[in-house]
Every structure is written in C-alpha cells, then in structure tokens.
Image (tube, grey):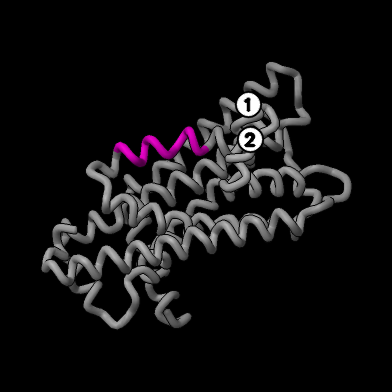
Amino acid sequence: MNPTLFWQVFRLQVLMTVRTPDTLHVFVTAPLYTCVFLAITEHAERPDLAGFAVLAPVLMSLWSMALMAGGELIGKEREQGTLEAVVATPARYSAVVTARIAAVTVLSTLSLAEAWLVAWAGFGLVVTIAHPLLFLAVLLLSAAAMAGTASCVSALFVLAPSARILQNTLSFPFFLLSGVLVPISYLPDWLQPASKVVFLSWSADLLRAAISPGSARDTTGGLLAVLLLGLAGYAVGTLLIDRILRRARVTGTLARI
C-alpha cells in the first residue's frame, strides 16, 4: 500500500472510531485500572512502583483496542455489505486491515494521558520519564507491533466460530504472560520462556526502563525483539487473510467467510 492510500485509510478509520462510542471503552476502563493499581502500590507503601502501575493500563488499553478492532473489523464489513466492494479495490485487503487497526491502536495511546492525569490528580503522584526518546520510540514501535499482531488475530477471528469468546480469551491471559503489571520473573519458571515470544513483554520492560532513573542499558535487543515479533505477526496475518480471501473467491462465498 502506498503512503497516500495508507493515510487515507488511517484517517477514515479514526473518524469512524470517534463516531462509534462503543469502540472507545478503553478510555473508560484505563482510568479505573489506574486507580486500582495505584491503590495497591499505595497500600503496599511502594511509591517506587507507581510508574509501573501507570504504564500497565496503557499497555492493556493498546492491546484491548487492537484486539477489538481486529476481531470485529471483517465481521462488520460483512454485516454492512461492504466487504465485497473493499476486496474488489486494487489495494491489498490485508494492508487495508492493518492500516485500520493501526489507526485504532494509535488512537488508544491517548489512554497514556488519562493514566498520568489520574496519578497526578487522584494520588498526587507525578510520574517522570527519565528517557523520553526511548519512551517515545518504544511506544510507537509497540503500537506498530500491536497493529501487525492484531492483523494476524483478525484472520484467526474469521476462522473461529465465535470471535467474541476468542477476544475474551486472549485478553487477561495475554496480560499476565506479557507481565504488563507483574514482571515475568514472578511467573513459574516453566512459563517464563513463553513470555519471550510475546512482544508486549519486551515493550513492558523497555517502558519501565524508560521511566526509571539511571542509564537504560541493553535496550537495543529489546527494541529489535519488538520489531521482529511485530513483523512476524504482520507476515502471518497477511498470509492468512490472503489465503482466506483466495478460498472465498474460488468458492464464491466471500460474504460468508
């Protein structure tokens, strides 16, 4: 997809999202999660963990929004009768799906401002970013990786009998496995290696390093891991979506894939 078309699809999806209130639920849940996590750190008298408690709802919001967009995008196209028209355009449909998910994911980064505001206004805590360039790079790279991974999930949702059940299944186990709040070092030893194939676990570690004082060391490997895992998700998603559409064209069941 050329940059102009990508931007047009991106902009269209942003406009559609802000006009659909039910897709913006993360902006309601993120402040609530922030209050819960900060209350836990305050009760435990661990103000040094406040930054981690603020980052967790942001990462959860990013994944939840991407997961919802990926799960419902193709389904809504079928319901509205626009899937055939979109597939018939010269643009590659898998690229269109990724662009739309990217728009939703980037929009969900606004939950970061919500979490920071809750920490300041509700708990009197100001979470500072010790390494702003690293923080910005990780946040943007994580959003891109989520868009690529969600495109893979989008294809799986087409094959699954119930996308809604699969959405609920992939949420909190994914959060625990990626260590968005509790570091993966607290997981059972046999489960920790599985966390390394989840890009969000690398993102969480890098964001924690970005807000922690002192020098941030060994971040190149983490950034590379997020990039490669995101690209892998995008590649698998593209392959699956293309195969699904190819099968649908052969069987003449595009509206019922």
Q: Position of residue 113 (x, y in %)?
A: 59, 47
Q: Is residue 91 above or below residue 193?
A: below
Classify 122 as above or below 42. below
Q: Amino acid at mark 1?
A: Pro
Left or right for 14, reference 117: left
Say which residue appears at 27% left-offset and 51% top-offset: 159
- Does residue 169 belong to the magenta stretch? yes
Question: From mark 1 to mark 2, how far is it between C-alphas?
Answer: 6 Å
Q: Secondary structure at mark 2?
A: helix
Residue extent of the magenta highlight: 165-174
Instruction: Choose top left, top right, bottom left or bottom right for residue 13.
Output: bottom left
Residue 215, image x and y in percent?
A: 87, 50
Residue 121 shows in the view? no
Q: Which residue is mark 1?
A: 188
Residue 192 is marked as 2
Is residue 246 visible in this depiction of the protein? yes
Residue 177 in the image: state x and y as whole percent. Answer: 56, 36
Task: Determine the secondary structure under disc 1.
Answer: loop
Q: Is residue 142 magenta?
A: no
Task: State the predominant SS element of the stretch in magenta.
Answer: helix
**Is 62 situated left or right of 46 in this image?**
left
Determine contact: label 1, label 2, CB under 8 Å.
yes
The single residue placed furthest to the front in the displayed view is: 190
Which residue corresponds to the image point at 73% horizontal and 31% vertical from the top-left? 49
Return the residue found at the far top. 43
Identity of the residue drawn at 32% across and 56% down: 19
